[in-house]
Image (cartoon, rainbow, N blue to C red):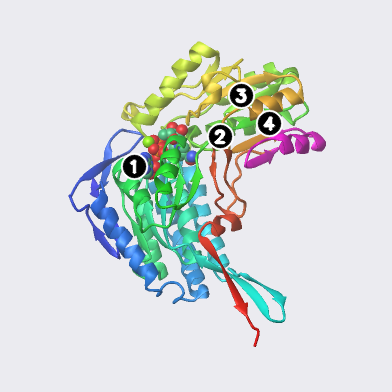
Amino acid sequence: MADALQNYIDGKWVDAQDGDRLDVFNPATGEVIATAPSSKQADVDAAVAAARRTFDDGTFWPGMSARERGRILLNAADIVRREHDRLARMESLDAGKPIGEATEDIAEVAFMFEYYGGWASKIAGESQHMDADAMFMVWKEPVGVAVGITPWNYPLMMATQKVAPAIAAGCTFILKPPEQTPLTCLELPKILEEAGLPTGVFHVLTGFGETAGAPLVAHPSVDKIGFTGSREVGKLIMRSGADTLKRVTLELGGKSPNIVFADADFESAVEGSANGVFWNQGEICSAGTRVFVENAIYDDAVSALSNRATSLVLGDPSGEDTTMGPLVSKEQQERVERYLEIGSGEARVAAQGSTPSDPTLANGYFVPPTIFADVTNDARIAREEIFGPVMSVIPFGAIDDVLTMANDNDYGLAAAIWTKDIKKAMRAAQALRAGIVWINDTQPAPTEMPWGGYKQSGVGRELGKHGLDDYLEEKAVYVNLAD
Ligand code: NAI
Ligand code: MG
């Protein structure tokens, strides 16, 4: 019997009020592994009422000291470390990611709690004297009731990078996890309760975007939305949030350029370029899916990248030898397969890996890793986010041409540059319209570093100190000291 999971609202585990449920699948086999509440407006109303009441009564903020808020987050880090293996296995099972990658994710989740635990006691404002008779202060206050709406590619990380700074800031918080992968997000209430978080601060309700996510965005008692997901839904959230002028931060993925100059260290550039598309099955917002390669090394690079694609081992994500798991859902598998068809009409298939032969995985959502070569920058596979193990390789001659092509896309989340020439690297980094630029590396996203996009990749920044600022308001307090 599949586990029947529940919402966590105001310190209690509850079903959706109408009893409706959704199925949670093992993407490697297509089997149902759990069911979770399909929450609706009534459940949203209950969660928001509790979060609002807890915020407004002042017991959490300013009632609890900043040190104590920090201590709770540090305790949460310890608990995540204690539960690390169990959480990593759960994440791997639910999202279909290789266990080695899930292991790294959970380790970073623990650090996120630690990092923002440290920040809680360092949130300070400013003051300025006008003259002897007047001064003003700028106070940092929590934004209020915050909501996180999160995606399935890094379930616990995407939730934690919103929840941890929100608690550090003194907000109350409602999490709406992805319908595809709610398992680890539903562990958060247990972790935070054991860590000492007071009842009423944190709530989780599962459900679909249209029925559980949309009412949270529209709710007049919610102050802030932190969203990670598709550009399409990001636009809906911005429009709907406008009615009550919510603070909205959006992280909406991309079509990131990965530029390999002929003077790069060839081995590391090939390895990095492949990892930037094939890690996490390519289900990465910042994946370097447009691989620009300088003419002089183009043929060699295409063949080396092809070898990397065909040597990937697709299989059960819990297997030690597996280097690529299934995509997260049937829907995502079909979406990526459509792009494989589109790409076959637009470019040359340079290499394609194989799906697992194991009959127990026959119904899993596997897609063969694929390299398209001789792609033009205006092809659909070079313009649209695919979110699967699909690379488009595009040749280039001059640096100005590649920078023009790299910027010629509506997205602007990330970019990678491979070269031994520091001047070239810095000049390219300066010209690229992207929120994150990696030089001679791909995908590092340390918790200390701000994360977010230019252009249609989003609004605002998460992680680092910047990720805390979005959960804080600034109050200017002016004092007349004259007699
Ligand atoms: P999605 O944007 O529909 O889902 C993300 C979250 O938003 C989920 O929790 C979902 O329930 C919620 N949501 C959906 N519609 C909503 C609405 N109207 N109001 C409020 N919340 C809503 O993403 P989906 O459908 O899972 O994936 C589609 C594509 O989105 C992917 O193929 C990929 O290109 C992109 N994507 C980007 C991600 C990123 O990291 N930036 C993560 C996941 C998907
Ligand atoms: Mg969707």
Q: Is residue 334 magenta?
A: no
Look at the numbered discs 1 and 3 and tell me whether their residues touch, using CB distance below 8 Å.
no
Which range is magenta? 418-440
The Cα–Cα distance between marks 1 and 2, rounded to whole angstroms, is 24 Å
Kindly identify which residue carries mark 2: 287
Q: Which residue bears the numbered disc 3?
A: 305
**Mark 4 falls on what kind of element?**
helix
Which quadrant of the rendered structure holds the N terminus?
top left
Name the front one of labels 2 and 3.
2
Which numbered disc flags the more N-terminal residue, 4 or 2? 4
Q: CA distance from mark 4 to mark 2?
A: 15 Å
Q: Is mark 1 within 8 Å of ligand 1?
A: yes
Disc 1 packing (10 Å; few <14; some 14–19; many ≥20):
many
Answer left or right for 437 relative to 92: right
Q: Which SS class for mark 2?
A: loop
Is residue 253 in view?
Answer: yes
Which residue, given by chain and number where applicable, does mark 4 sit on? 269
Which residue: 68% across, 16% down?
A: 299
Residue 74 location (% of width, % of height): 50, 67
Q: Residue at x 44, y 16 (%)?
A: 341
Query: Which mark is first along the chain, 1 or 4?
Result: 1
Quarter of the image where ligand 2 sits: top left
Q: Amino acid at mark 2?
A: Ala
> Where is residue 176 shown, x and y percent of the image?
36, 50
Work out how far the residue at label 4 is from the one at label 1, CA to CA, in angstroms.
Answer: 38 Å
Q: Which residue is mark 1?
A: 209
- Residue type at mark 1 is Gly
| Residues at marks 2 and 3, CA–CA distance in whole angstroms | 15 Å
Residue 151 showing in the rendered view: no
Question: Dot 3, crowdedness within 10 Å: few (<14), some or many (≥20)?
Answer: many
Spot occupied by residue 420 in the image (x, y as percentages of width and height):
79, 34
Q: Is residue 126 left or right of residue 460?
A: right
